[in-house]
């Protein structure tokens, strides 16, 4: 199993080490302007600079298919750790991902994910099917996916909606968690994109695209989206749990 990590302007990223310590082969997808700055194994040039996250995610999908990679992890480059919640928050290593892989192999869903560490304790169910977001670090059945990431939207969440619409959908392990910095706070990556207010425009576009199932809502410090994922999945005739 491999891990695909898109990275921009973070040549000192250490996320890949977490995966390598668990036996995963990691591929970094880099802009030409960053390529020589990264001293990591398995570098892949994405051929163009400054094309945004949608471009690189679609590049990764195409690269996987061209290299006969049927299933793999797509992870952000600022993952800090993994664990589970079992009466208390327990830090683990990336070997917990193999538990997810074992379940995914038996089920038809195209995307599998985990919870944020700060929310795992709130969940009563071990799994959610087509009812919770899967993002940051997700297992992708690339060979089952024909849809694309779309520009100027919350690309991971829009992609998940497309997955429910066009495939079997997504399953989230609610008690398995990852930790990462808060959105838009870590230098490099999408930091400038958030700082320029593009996230608000993406939220508006997503609300228009998926109305009435998604609405734009104002949070304390930013515009975000509120989604009835479950209702949308039911409208598509998909399994919901």
Image (cartoon, rainbow, N blue to C red):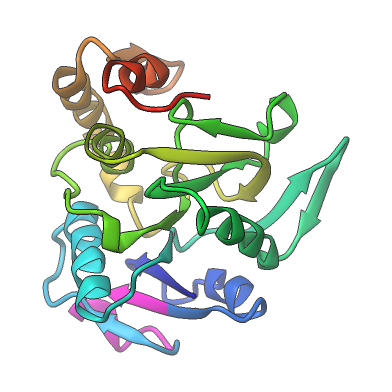
Q: Residue drawn 19% across and 28% down?
A: 201
Left or right of 223: which side holds 212?
A: left
Which x, y percent locates residue 134?
46, 41
Q: Using the rendered view, name the quadrant where residue 230 is placed.
A: top left
Q: Is residue 212 above or below residue 179?
A: above
| 149 falls in the magenta region | no
The magenta segment is 27-39
Q: Using the rendered view, name the quadrant where residue 151 is placed.
A: top left
Q: Can residue 192 be spotted in the picture?
A: yes
Q: Is residue 114 above or below residue 20?
A: above
Q: Nearer the viewer, residue 28 or 87?
A: 87
Q: Is residue 17 above or below residue 174?
A: below
Q: Is residue 82 above or below residue 1?
A: above
Q: Can residue 225 be spotted in the picture?
A: no
The number of numbered badges drawn on the structure is: 0
| Residue reaching furthest to the front | 106
Which x, y percent locates residue 157?
33, 36
Which x, y percent locates residue 107?
48, 49
Left or right of 148: which side holds 136?
A: right
Q: Residue drawn 44% across and 44% down?
A: 135
Q: Nearer the viewer, residue 154 or 240?
A: 240
Which x, y percent locates residue 176?
67, 46
| Residue reaching furthest to the top | 212
Left or right of 56: which side holds 139?
A: right
Q: Residue drawn 66% across and 31% down?
A: 119
Q: Residue drawn 46% across and 16% down?
A: 220
| 30 falls in the magenta region | yes
């Amino acid at each position: 199993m491999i891990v695909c990590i898109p990275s921009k302007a973070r040549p000192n990223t250490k996320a890949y080490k977490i995966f390598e310590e668990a036996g995963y082969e990691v591929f970094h997808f880099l802009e030409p302007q960053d390529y020589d700055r990264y001293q990591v194994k398995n570098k892949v040039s994405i051929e163009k600079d400054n094309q945004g996250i949608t471009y690189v995610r679609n590049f990764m999908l195409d690269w996987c298919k061209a290299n006969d990679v049927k299933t793999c992890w797509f992870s952000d480059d600022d993952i800090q750790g993994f664990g589970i919640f079992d009466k208390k928050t327990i830090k683990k290593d990336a070997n917990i991902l193999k538990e997810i892989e074992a379940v995914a192999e038996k089920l038809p869903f195209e995307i599998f994910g985990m919870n944020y560490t700060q929310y795992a304790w709130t969940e009563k169910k071990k799994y959610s099917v087509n009812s919770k977001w899967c993002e940051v670090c997700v297992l992708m059945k690339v060979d089952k996916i024909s849809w694309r990431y779309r520009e100027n939207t919350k690309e991971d969440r829009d992609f998940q909606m497309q997955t429910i619409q066009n495939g079997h959908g997504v399953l989230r392990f609610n008690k398995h968690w990852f930790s990462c910095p808060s959105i838009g706070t870590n230098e490099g990556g999408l930091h400038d994109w958030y700082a320029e207010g593009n996230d608000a425009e993406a939220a508006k576009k997503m609300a228009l695209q998926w109305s009435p199932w998604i609405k734009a809502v104002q949070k304390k410090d930013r515009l975000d989206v509120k989604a009835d994922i479950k209702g949308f999945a039911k409208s598509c005739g998909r399994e919901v749990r």
